[in-house]
Image (spheres, helix red, strand yellow):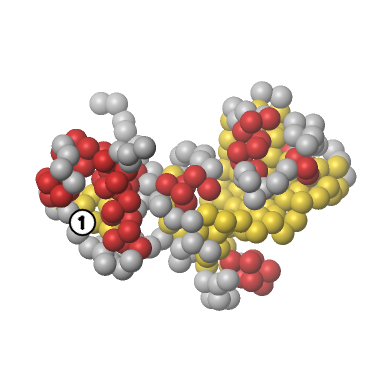
Amino acid sequence: MAIPKFAEIKQYIITCIESGEWEENARVPSENQLAELFTCSRMTARRALTELTDNGVLERSQGLGTFVAGRKSQSSMLAIRNIADEIKDRGHGYSVQQLALRQVNASAPIAIALALELGSPVFHSVLVHCEQGVPLQVEERYVNPAFAPDYLAQDFSEQTPHEYLSQVAPLTEAHHTIEAIIASSELQQRLAIPATEPCLQISRRTWSRQGVVSFAKLVHPGSRFKLGGHLTFNK
């Protein structure tokens, strides 16, 4: 089956970036140039550029053109997306290390977060999500067993906790806080960062119709990650 032209253009751009031919902040060919190079319409070329811009691979500047984005991986401040999809959408390889998957008794902070009694059994997982083999996020998650009883039986190399929980307890509400932290020695080791590097931590509670499903702390190295979003307001 022939590859769609817009996908072919996207792969060409990603290859040029990954090979080092186009460095960070380098200007990429225009819609007209890409349309001519791939013998396609400007609309097709625009779709490729737009999708790569939306995925954080490229950046557009009004009146100046389109450029290779900075090396930091970007996630939306507003949307809750699957990290594996975010990484793959950037044209990069995704992998994961599972460090813990077990049942524990809820401490006071976890019991409060999950709206359970102190000492209640909860499921606990710790994963390191990697982009191109480099740690991008440490995910520590506590799950209410009532809403995901088979959580401990899952293979999280096949799907992320977010994917699984979205299937068994569809998300209806979320609350998150974002803060800069200094990583513990354990986090430094897991993220392969020096002691001096700050991190960005997202603390997130998610609900289904039945109640609080999970509480997660997502920690990212400051040198490899940024948050962004676009807001449109009605006049």
- Say how many tags the image has: 1
- Give residue 67's quadrant in the image: bottom left
State whether residue 29 is above or below residue 221: above
Residue 46 can be seen, yes or no: no
In-image side of 92 versus 116 (left or right): left
Residue 233, position as x, y percentages in the image:
31, 31
- Give residue 5's quadrant in the image: top left
- Give residue 209's quadrant in the image: top right
Residue 122 can be seen, yes or no: yes
Mark 1 sits on what residue?
28
Residue drawn at 36 percent across, 37 percent down:
1
Residue drawn at 53 percent across, 64 percent down:
133
Where's the C terminus, which quadrant? top left
Which residue ends up furthest to the front in the rendered image?
A: 1
State whether residue 123 is above or below residue 43: below
Is 74 or 52 nearer to us in this picture?
52
Q: Residues within 10 Å of mark 1 (few under 14, many from 20)?
A: many
What SS does tag 1 mark?
A: loop
Residue drawn at 52 percent across, 65 percent down:
134
Residue 227, position as x, y percentages in the image:
43, 51
In-image side of 207 versus 43 (left or right): right
Which residue ends up furthest to the top in the rendered image?
A: 209
Residue type, mark 1 in image: Val
Residue drawn at 61 percent across, 48 percent down:
203
Residue 111, position as x, y percentages in the image:
79, 42
